[in-house]
Amino acid sequence: MSKARISPVRSGFVHLALAGYTAIALFPVLLTILNSFKDKNAIFRSPLSPPTMKSFSLIGYETVLKQGDFVGYFQNSLIVTVVSIFFVLLFGAMAAFALSEYRFRGNTLMGLYLAIGIMIPIRLGTVAILQGMVAAGLVNTLTALILVYTAQGLPLAIFILSEFMRTVSDDLKNAGRIDGLSEYAIFFRLVLPLIRPAMATVAVFTMIPIWNDLWFPLILAPGEATKTVTLGSQVFIGQFVTNWNAVLSALSLAIFPVLILYVIFSRQLIRGITAGAVK
């Protein structure tokens, strides 16, 4: 069976659209990084201009590294984000496999119940979550953040992955069963490798809200030893005076993990987003 070909005009339009979207999306990032290398006066006088020999300054990065434990904040954010993504992908994929593979009474209702978290934001339950963490003795621990972010990411993960699970060939899975593979082996060895684009998509969409979140670190883990990058950068923002050099430098450092993840998973991410869109 021959593959459908995309006309040169359509291909050129797609590439032009992607280039325009990339430029618009990266402009604020580039602007933040450029201004982090300027002195305070240059930031306000010419925010859109690149740093010059006269305006170049590393005072922001020096302040970030000297004031507070920014390396510790970075480590906390990395631990919380990586562990949360791991659990979201693991439990989300397992739940999606069960919903898509096995037919039982209440299958549809169970899927709707698991996906309801997409429509109801978890922040509405902040008070109950805080009370539960206090009762469990998990306040000011990274475990509290990991549990909340895992619960926050599961609904979207289940919703996306279950659709991809249904596209996996039943013949392949039945062949594995005939060969004596267990359901766990079929899941880990046959199904997961085929839905890597979807896994990468879920990973990126899960990471960004976790890495940039300020609400739950402020509520559940405001202690110095458990601060995240986003919460730690707030020390440079005062009620009357803000150290913009330090704020922009802290944000620039916090941007790099997201960019690195995007570069690593960009191809899988695009495949996961566009899967099924073009026939």
Image (spheres, grey):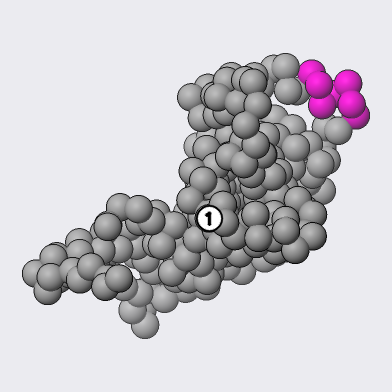
Q: Residue at point 79% right, 60% down?
A: 180
Q: Residue at point 72% right, 58% down?
A: 178
Image quadrant occupied by the N terminus = bottom left
Find numbered disc 1 in the image and state the secondary structure of the residue it sits on: loop
Q: Residue at point 51% right, 46% down?
A: 166
Query: For the magenta stretch, what is the residue range?
Result: 131-137
Between 21 and 77, which is closer to the camera in this rendering?
21
Residue 140 in view in this figure: yes
Q: Residue at point 30% right, 63% down?
A: 22
Between 251 and 20, which is closer to the camera in this rendering?
20
* Residue 82: image location, x then y, percent: 69, 56
| Amino acid carrying mark 1 in the image | Ser
Quadrant in the picture for residue 195: bottom right
| 240 over 34 or under it: above or below | above
* Residue 98: image location, x then y, percent: 66, 39
- Outermost residue toward the front? 178
Residue position for label 1: 169
